[in-house]
Amino acid sequence: MTLLESIIKAVFRQKWIVFASDSVIYFTSVKRTLFDPLTISARSAASCWLQGLEIEEIINMRKITRRSFLTAAVACGAAAALTACGGSSSASSAAASSTVASASVAAASNGEKFTVGICQLVQHAALDAATQGFEDALTASFGENVTFDFQNAQGDSATCATIANGFVSSGVALIMANATPALQAAQAATNTIPILGTSVTEYGVALGLDNFSGTVGGNVSGTSDLAPLDQQADMIVEWMPEVKKVGLLYCSAEANSQYQVDEVQKYLEAKGVTATQYAFSDSNDLSSVCQKAADENDALYVPTDNTVAANTGIVDGICRPAKKPVFAGEEGICSGCGVATLSISYYDLGYTTGEMAVKILNGESDISTMAIEYTDVTKKYNKAICDDLGLTVPEGYVEIEA
């Protein structure tokens, strides 16, 4: 019987019941139906439960972030577990400790140690969060038996290639490629070491795959940060029903940025909006291209573009004084220069990628058959910029936390 099967049903503080499956755990009350959206790593949930976290904090997930929940799971020690679970019997506490110990041994593949290489294209909030989530997921399963070789390419695709080749030479167990250029470099470097991408929008475009159906095959899989592009076009029109012209600002060096603006352009034009692409080659010409786009359009759209994400101050410094709203493909960009976005949690995206890595390293899954995984989106807005531009927020949008 596995760890997860062994805790199929247990009473927590005589109020809450834990139901476990092979991949997720659900918390529910004996007096209410299953708590609908709470599906988390079973191992992390079991860890929290056994380590005595306040169950009200776990249940009320809408009041705390998933990151806080998972961070707490990692932070709690065994000593705190025994203290916090004072309401349980000593036998129950001993059984819990034994179960956690057994899980740790099983998760670490009988003590095998792993080195995982992480190639991150550039440092900005979204990619940083994805890397943190990835590391947290692996650490939650392997503890000290996993180490990370983190490398930042400083926004340079050629440096991504150097980093990936270095990982191959050093014989890492797995490569996590954070952003499209990192994924492309890793795939070019090896066809044997497992590669998991994250913060990659469309794998078919990124890797030049014809008739991509959701599974890359070979030694590559991962997670996607794609928010539905038709809904992004809808968002622009929802905020600005009278909009006539929208400028699509993106870096021409990023294949997935090109894909997104191509698609959004089609959706906007189908709504009668004139959409024009404004490509810049790197951060050096971002300012001049952004200025031209702001001068010639009613609003701008920016996809999940890493160069813009690392330089939102440039865009905000041009567009906000000009009273030109910017609609963003992700929350980090929106926080820096946008008015609204369809947001995903990059921490959760990275964590999901880490859970995939655990299955690969434990031999539970074959990467060649693992489909690309996606995450849910939330409508969000930037209150400060909306206030400055005098925009009325449509219903259903959540304020981005400062």
Image (cartoon, rainbow, N blue to C red):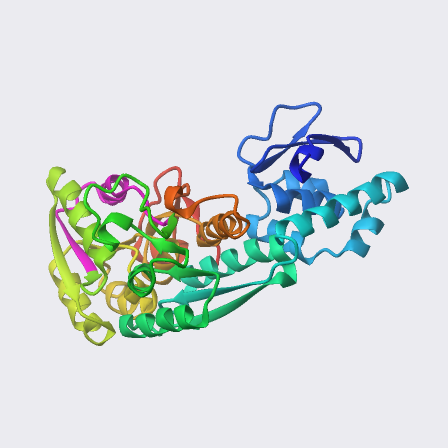
Q: Is residue 191 above or below residue 20?
A: below
Q: Is residue 294 above or below residue 27?
A: below
| Image spot of residue 237 (x, y percent) | 22, 42
Q: Is residue 36 above or below residue 147?
A: above
Q: Is residue 27 left or right of residue 79?
A: left
Which span is picked out in magenta?
A: 224-249
Residue 176 location, quadrant? bottom left
The number of numbered discs placed on residues in the rendered structure image is 0
Residue at position x 43%, y 72% in the image: 151
| Image spot of residue 83 (x, y percent) | 84, 51
Front residue of 185/72: it is 185
Q: Is residue 202 visible?
A: no
Front residue of 166/47: it is 166
Residue at position x 37%, y 46% in the image: 368
Front residue of 141/173: it is 173
Q: Is residue 394 visible?
A: yes
Q: Residue furthest right?
A: 90
Front residue of 281/237: it is 281
Q: Is residue 294 left or right of residue 325?
A: left
Instruction: Identify the image quadrant of the N terminus.
Output: top right
Q: Is 163 contained in the magenta span?
A: no
Q: Is 225 contained in the magenta span?
A: yes
Residue at position x 51%, y 60% in the image: 132
Residue 336 location, quadrant? bottom left
| Image spot of residue 277 (x, y percent) | 13, 57
Q: Is residue 71 left or right of residue 155?
A: right
Residue 168 location, quadrant? bottom left
